[in-house]
Image (cartoon, grey):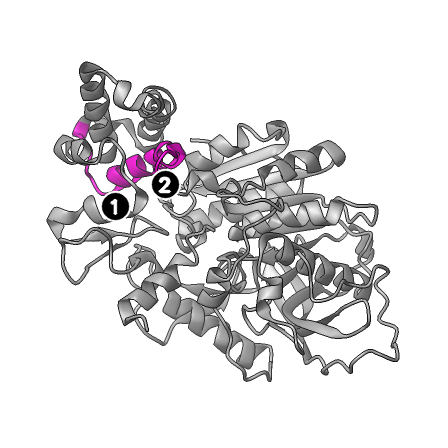
Amino acid sequence: MMGLNQFKLAKYALMLLPVFSLPASFTANGSDDNKTEAKSAPKAEVVITEHSIKLNGDKISYKAIAGETILKDDKGDPIASIFSISYLRTKVKDKRKRPVTFVFNGGPGSASLWLHMGLFGPQRVVLPSDASDDGAAPYSLVANEYSMLDESDLVFIDPVGTGFSRALGENKGEDFWGVKEDAKSIAEFMRRWLIEHGRWNSPKYLAGESYGTARAAALVDELQGGWTDISINGVMLISSILDFSHARYQPGNNQPYIGFLPTMAATAFYHNKVSEQDKALGLEVFVQQARDFAITDYALALLQGSRLDESTYASVRKRLARFTGLTENYLDRVNLRVSGSRYTKQLLRNQDLTVGRLDSRFTGVDYDSGGERSDNDPSGYGIDGAYTTAIHEYLYQDLDVKITRPFNVLSIDVNRGWNWNISGKQMHYVNVAPYLGKAQRENKDFRIFVANGYYDFATPFFATENTFADNGIDNARVTMTYYKAGHMMYIEPESLKQLAKDIRHFYHGKSDDTKG
């Protein structure tokens, strides 16, 4: 049985991953016709409420549909219940022109409350603006002036094992926990939703965060990869991770050291661990110099390994110390290779502080300062109380949901049980980025929006840039944006404001590239 600190660490690790076959196949034609052998499906619990919100000077009337969708196999037997919350604007003249956006978070194992209560939804929870701990209740929930309801109808999806969603009958959650399994079940949910709401001919978008970006790529392939084609207009990837080789610290894999370095530079800059001369450069210029070093001299040094001559080694070590804020002595001891988890513990060790992994602006205090890694993630426990409270109060007080079984915010079981096999062969690193390149080649209207936080050690921005520089992706149809915040950049007020503006531009087909 794991101790409390181990449990918490595992809990927050779910959001850092960054992070098939169903028991029987789905019906090919979407029919729910009763068959003699079909088992009776449990009654789906659904609640519909009416609301309004003022956005950009306009009063938006909408209905909220909170409830379950029962997925069935080809015999008509129920296999899973997917809980979702849909927001549909009322009094719309032509639904064909009204976009619908399907939204989910990641984990794997996370419900969609983070993007729901932090960015897209009609209400949001307010956190301290200075990256300090959220403390205890009461928390403040306010009408979200940045909600996307004026641009698009919204559907927040909780995959099986998260939120209220669950496997049914003799089926197990593990049957839905995997890259391909997950994409197939969410695709079936979307197909059912489009039929039920008459939206097959509406513009369709996906919005995912963290592992939700990998889900979005796998889902695009599932939706557009066959003749029953559900074409997607665009995806919004918030804190993206598509090629997991960039996040797996294993002997012989140098990708993470390269991809994480500019995030270390940004973090050192934020915590004043750089020289006055470098501070005068400004964050964006300093980070760009770290990028240039990471992809050239540093990458070449790592590739050379023991073949690196002493003089070059010393030069690389000195420049690495400049960008990381760590001592040359420490960098020598780790052979020029600093993992993200080591860095978050080491940077402020002399101050008896650790920095956050989801958001390195946050700091925390461990049981002691001599350990190898942080006890917990201060940027995880710094926000989870507020978000967990917000979704529960909102579900039961505003949406009148009656379901009383536990709402799974982040499931360790889902994360540990995830099937990463996507090719039928043993794979160490999943890479779903090529799906996006394929989607662009086969859909001329398919566009990609990517939001990056400078202080994100879960899905570092430079690793994302390296992914998009390859994998057959047409970057002319990719909008990259950057924010002075972390993994959930929308918890920082100015970043939230800018992110909402950037997403609105994306809906309208505009590019406001703020690459730093």
Tell me if 328 is positioned left or right of 456 in this view.
left
Q: Earlier in the sequence, mark 1 or mark 2?
A: 2
In this figure, which residue is indicated by the disc labeled 2?
250
Q: Which mark, by number, is residue 342?
A: 1
Residue shown at 67% from the left, 71% from the top: 80
Q: Main secondary structure of the magenta part?
A: helix
Tell me if 329 is positioned left or right of 94 in this view.
left
Residue shown at 30% from the left, 52% from the top: 356
Q: Which mark, by number, is residue 268?
A: none
What is the CA distance from the residue labelled 1 to the residue labelled 2? 14 Å
Tell me if 321 is positioned left or right of 427 in this view.
left
The amino acid at mark 1 is Arg
Q: Residue 102 placed where, x, y %?
A: 65, 56
Q: Which residues are magenta?
A: 249-276
The relative height of residue 207 versus residue 471 in the rendered view (above or below) is: below
Residue shown at 58% from the left, 42% from the top: 432
Quarter holding residue 234: top right
The amino acid at mark 2 is Gln
Name the element at disc 2.
loop
